[in-house]
Image (cartoon, helix red, strand yellow):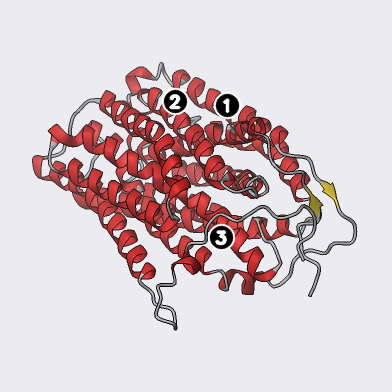
Amino acid sequence: MEQAAPAEVVDPPVQRARMIGYASGNFGKNVLASTMDVFLLFVLTERWGVSPAAAGLVVMIGLVWDGLCDPLLGRLVDRSADRLGLYRRLLFVGAPLVGVFFTLFFLDPGWRGPAILVWATVTVLLFRTAYSVCDVAHNALMMRMTRAPGAATTLSGLRYMFSCLGALTVAHFARAFVDPAADGGGYGLLAVTGGAALAYVATLWLSAASAPRSVVAPGASAPRAPLAWILGNRPLLLLLALGFVQALTLPFFARSFAYIGKGIFHDPGWTGKALTMLALSQLLALPSWMWVARRFEQGHVLGLALATTAAGLTLFATGSAAMIAGIAVFGVGNAGLQMMLWAALANAIDHGERDTGTRFEGLPVALLLLTLKTGGGLSGALLGHGLSLTGWNATARLTPNQGDQLMTLAWSVPLCGALSCLALLVCLRRRRSPDGFTARSSWFPRASRPRPSGNAP
């Protein structure tokens, strides 16, 4: 058997201070990602006059391109003899480029019609290309810091905690995006996006500086046969399926907030309130999810998170009096779901290493990012098409019937997605092994025990 990567020796365990420093990168990442996820479509349709269907295509093109870049980058980083060093270099060099392209998008050139559509597409593609480089490096770095028992759950929880803080920050500045009167002639939006870009660079650099140092072992070769490793890793395949379905459907909910605030409540401030409740409920729920995840199987925790998410959407659908409460319950469930996706990825990577003796990090991370971003991109296109079907017009008020259609669109699609993921989870957990016992451990491996530093056998 070929000698497998990783070729570097890392001194475990990773100190808690390093974990916090690394996890802080999710603050900057989510400030930018949430801004683009929630407000990109709205800025295109409401500020720049792009039709909802065309705006949805811009969202889809950017995210799908980002996702397609990820596997190539993942394979390249897996072939490096010094992965930790490469991760740090990519973050230090790539983060400023991401910040520049992000800010550039929100600089309105004053064009309209086909010209603004071309401008938006080009700047989104530039942003997504640079973001992909840093995203793969930052997420793959997590897999080098989770070898000790329970580390994946702890670090995934810390990451999502910083993500929630980033989402709260975006919610606080939501009015700059949805209310032109609060923009100050464009300078307010420029200040907000410029500050977001600086926060991204600072926290990604802190993540890179917090990474443990590696010592490159001589003579080790890069791992081979990645396709066989992926196809033989059933926990990873299940995770990719769940990740795609939830990314295709759940983003409908938060992306609809800006349209609900303007078109139904005629109150730009409602969007900020809804996003604040969503982020705050996720943040407050995280300690409980971390406690649960350490004591129960991953499949049970994922099922509970999906059921809670579905309950929140059902509550939201009952009427305006329960909408904020429904958003809060949805946030509680979504916190557990998003945290467990990355904890499950770390354990799936360890599972593949135990089965084959070869460890891949960048490629599995990239494949999960590909499924999440492709699903999210298609979700944006579907939302844009749905808005067109409801008759959304940036300059006209919605009729009561159109408002009902918009509201139904906001909760029904993510509810179908949550229930579909839950059904998939239940069906797979009932899969029978040849000896008649339920083959749960093959789909949901427990967190691995620490391995000795050095090359894989």
Snapshot quadrant of residue 330: top left
Query: Relative to 210, is 354 above or below?
Result: below
Dot 1 crowding, Cα within 10 Å, few <14, some 14–19, many 20+: many
Kind of residue sitting beneath label 1:
Ala
Disc 1 marks which residue?
199
Instruction: Say which label, 3 or 1, has the lower sequence index.
Output: 1
Q: In which quarter of the image is the N terminus?
A: bottom right
Query: Relative to 333, is 235 above or below?
Result: below
Q: Are marks 3 and 1 in contact (CB under 8 Å)?
A: no
Horizontal arrangement in the rendering, residue 362 relative to residue 162 (left or right): right
Instruction: Classify mark 2: helix, strand or loop.
Output: helix
Does residue 68 appear in the picture of this structure? no
Q: Which residue is drawn at 62% across and 45% down?
A: 142
Snapshot quadrant of residue 433: bottom left
Q: Which of 445 and 323 is in front in this view?
A: 445
Instruction: Classify mark 3: helix, strand or loop.
Output: helix
Kind of residue sitting beneath label 2:
Thr
Q: Where is residue 158 in the image (x, y as percent from the top left)?
A: 53, 36
Q: Where is residue 384 in the image (x, y as percent from the top left)?
A: 32, 49
Residue 268 tag number? none
Disc 2 marks which residue?
169
Q: Which residue is drawn at 44% across and 83% down?
A: 434
Q: Nearer the viewer, residue 448 or 30?
A: 448
Dot 3 crowding, Cα within 10 Å, few <14, some 14–19, many 20+: many
The residue furthest top is 184
Q: Where is residue 207 in the image (x, y as percent from the top left)?
A: 65, 34
Disc 3 marks which residue?
348
Q: In which quarter of the image is the C terminus?
A: bottom right
